[in-house]
Image: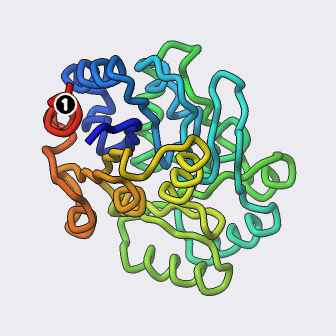
Amino acid sequence: MKYRLLALDLDGTLLDSHLQIRSATIEALARVRTMGVQVMIVTGRHHVAAYPYWHQLGLDLPAICCNGTYLYDYRQRRALVSNPLPRQDALRLLELVRKHDIYTMIYVDDFMAYESECKHLKILLQWSATLPEDLRPRIDRVHSFERMLEEIGTVWKFAASGDDLPAMSAFASDLEQSLGLSCEWSAHNRLDIACAGNSKGSRLAGWIAGQGIAREEVIAIGDQQNDMEMLRLAGMGVAMGNSREEVRACADWITGSNDSDGIADALHRFVLTSS
């Protein structure tokens, strides 16, 4: 099969446990691009946190960010299409966050905001500190989310997390029933909340339709529940070896983990062997 587009998740997929891209992956991606296969990042991350990897790989395409909430063009420095949270929905969602006492970050405008630190945030801050200043994402500590939401322009998503999984599930159930928002697990203990209908799969489907690319010409690679729709959409959906069982079940192929050369192996099997 002649593929025209490779759609890649970041965390747990393109990135290893140290948030690095493996050298074998970089080499394989360079080779598939010389064959005319375009490479697109499709991530739950804010565009400022995906940019260092887009820049490292020298990509051209815009990136699908915040689980399909928007398509971001780095060259034009703007979102091309988007479906952000209305301010009133964000304020109502924040009320539920307070009610359930759930840790959250809020992705807005051109930065990510937090009120207090958690384990995941500390890892993100440590990673950010290793980057050159011009690639470093903006991650701001704010005194009050409520005040910030009254002042900023765009709310992309809420990123909630916690190790009390029953409490997280109860929170997700409450907000889905009361607010009708979209909830997707981006890790076993992280929940991404955005407007209903936003997903990696739906945004990718819209983009390829506009480009005249058939779904059979897409190969997609991911590892989490928020990747499942994208894997089903693609002509070839590849799940990482570190994926949960439900993600593996919806994939056409299972490759090695993100701490192995799983992506390179999949590309050699399905793309590079046809060169």
Tag 1, which secondary structure?
helix
Graded by Cα atoms within 10 Å as few (under 14), some (14 to 19) or many (20 or more), the crowding at tag 1 reads: few
The answer to whether any part of residue 263 appears in the image is: no
Q: Is residue 265 visible?
A: yes
Snapshot quadrant of residue 86: bottom right
Across the whole image, how many numbered discs are drawn on residues? 1
Q: Is residue 212 above or below residue 176?
A: above
**Side of 178 where 218 appears, left or right:** left
Q: Nearer the viewer, residue 1 or 89?
A: 1
Q: Nearer the viewer, residue 41 or 217?
A: 217
Q: Amino acid at mark 1?
A: Ser
Quarter occupied by the N terminus: top left
Q: Residue at x 53, y 46 (%)?
A: 208
Relative placement, left or right, of 97 versus 126 is right
- Residue 141 drawn at (x, y percent): 64, 41
What coloring was used for the rendering?
A: rainbow
**Depicted 188 relative to depicted 37: above or below:** below
Q: Position of residue 262 (x, y in %)?
A: 17, 39
The C terminus sits in image quarter: top left
Q: Residue at x 57, y 41 (%)?
A: 211
Q: Between residues 99 and 58, which one lies in front from this camera angle?
A: 58
Q: Which residue is mark 1?
A: 274
Residue depicted at x 39% and y 36%: 4
Q: Residue at x 74, y 72 (%)?
A: 92
Q: Position of residue 240 (x, y in %)?
A: 22, 49
Location of residue 37 in the rendering, given as x and y in whole percent from the top left corner: 38, 29
